[in-house]
Image (cartoon, grey):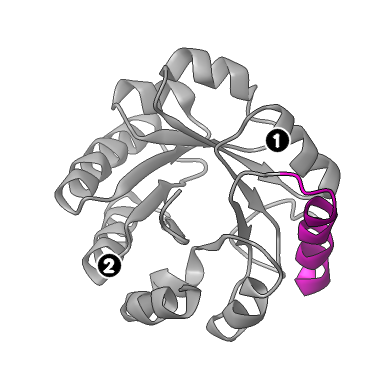
């Protein structure tokens, strides 16, 4: 994993999603996760095809949320799986070698599960309350990330890159990076203010 900043797309229509993703790429994002819940099937396919093309043009990673078959169909760089979105091993078999498979985690036990499943990276959250996700799990806060990272550090266990996710504001990033996580995954922050991308990257370094 090279990038410490993942952008998770937002928007309730194809034009809105596409516009938000393009603005993020133009601002310097180099990792896009296409996330559009309740999307019409044809619109989602069209969006993913377009975004894959944009990501190639901008030399960015294109990850599809949930939809393993769709990720395979458009030859995306990988897929991100929620805890109820199917087995990592099945996705690995379907997508083949060299593809990125990330997984959501909400607790230390989830992180251990994701490590056992050999995820390439883990999206751990939520950090704080967020309106972009239904059925929100209990928030972790800084202490939650600190505890998880300390657990593996004390045991000298090598773990996949862990990205904090969920309700992250610009002012939260320095303290989050002190907890031991690898990077952050944000949606609303960059959707609202894509011009912040270069500043966020500087903080993350």
**Residue 5, percent from left and from top:** 45, 62
Stretch of the chain drawn in magenta: 138-157
Is residue 139 shown to the viewer in this render? no
Dot 1: element? helix
Determine crowd level at label 1: few under 14, some 14-19, many 20+ residues with C-alpha closer than 10 A: some
Is residue 148 shown to the viewer in this render? yes
Determine crowd level at label 2: few under 14, some 14-19, many 20+ residues with C-alpha closer than 10 A: some
Q: Which mark is residue 28?
A: 2
Which callout, 2 or 1, points to the residue nearer the camera?
A: 1
Relative to 171, 193 lies left or right: left
Relative to 128, 155 lies left or right: right
**Residue 145, percent from left and from top:** 76, 63
Location of residue 44 with respect to 26 vertically, above or below: above
Q: Residue at x 26, y 45 (%)?
A: 51
Relative to 38, 123 lies left or right: right
In this view, the residue in front, 145 or 129, is: 145
Disc 2 to disc 1, C-alpha distance? 30 Å
Q: Earlier in the sequence, mark 2 or mark 1?
A: 2
In this view, the residue in front, 18 or 75, is: 75
Relative to 75, 103 lies left or right: right
Q: Residue at x 19, y 48 (%)?
A: 54
- Judged by its main secondary structure, the magenta piece is helix
**Residue 44, percent from left and from top:** 36, 37
Residue named by callout 1: 115
Location of residue 135 with respect to 64 vertically, above or below: below
Q: Residue at x 46, y 48 (%)?
A: 1
Residue 41 shown in magenta: no
**Residue 15, percent from left and from top:** 27, 54
């Amino acid at each position: 994993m090279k990038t410490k900043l993942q952008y998770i797309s937002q928007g309730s229509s194809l034009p809105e999603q596409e516009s938000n993703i393009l603005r993020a790429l133009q601002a310097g994002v180099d990792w896009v996760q296409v996330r559009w819940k309740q999307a019409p099937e044809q619109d989602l396919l069209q969006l993913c095809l377009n975004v894959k093309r944009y990501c190639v043009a901008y030399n960015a990673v294109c990850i599809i949320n949930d939809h393993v078959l769709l990720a395979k169909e458009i030859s995306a760089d990988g897929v991100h799986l929620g805890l109820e979105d199917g087995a990592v091993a099945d996705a690995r078999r379907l997508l083949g070698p060299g593809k990125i498979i990330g997984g959501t985690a909400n607790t230390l036990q989830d992180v251990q599960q994701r490590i056992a499943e050999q995820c390439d990276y883990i999206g751990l959250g939520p950090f704080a309350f967020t309106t972009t996700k239904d059925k929100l799990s209990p928030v972790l806060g800084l202490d939650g990330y600190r505890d998880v990272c300390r657990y593996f550090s004390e045991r000298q266990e090598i773990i996949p890159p862990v990205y904090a996710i969920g309700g992250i504001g610009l002012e939260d990033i320095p303290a989050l990076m002190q907890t031991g996580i690898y990077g952050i995954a944000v949606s609303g922050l960059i959707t609202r203010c894509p011009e912040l991308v270069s500043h966020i990257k500087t903080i993350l370094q």
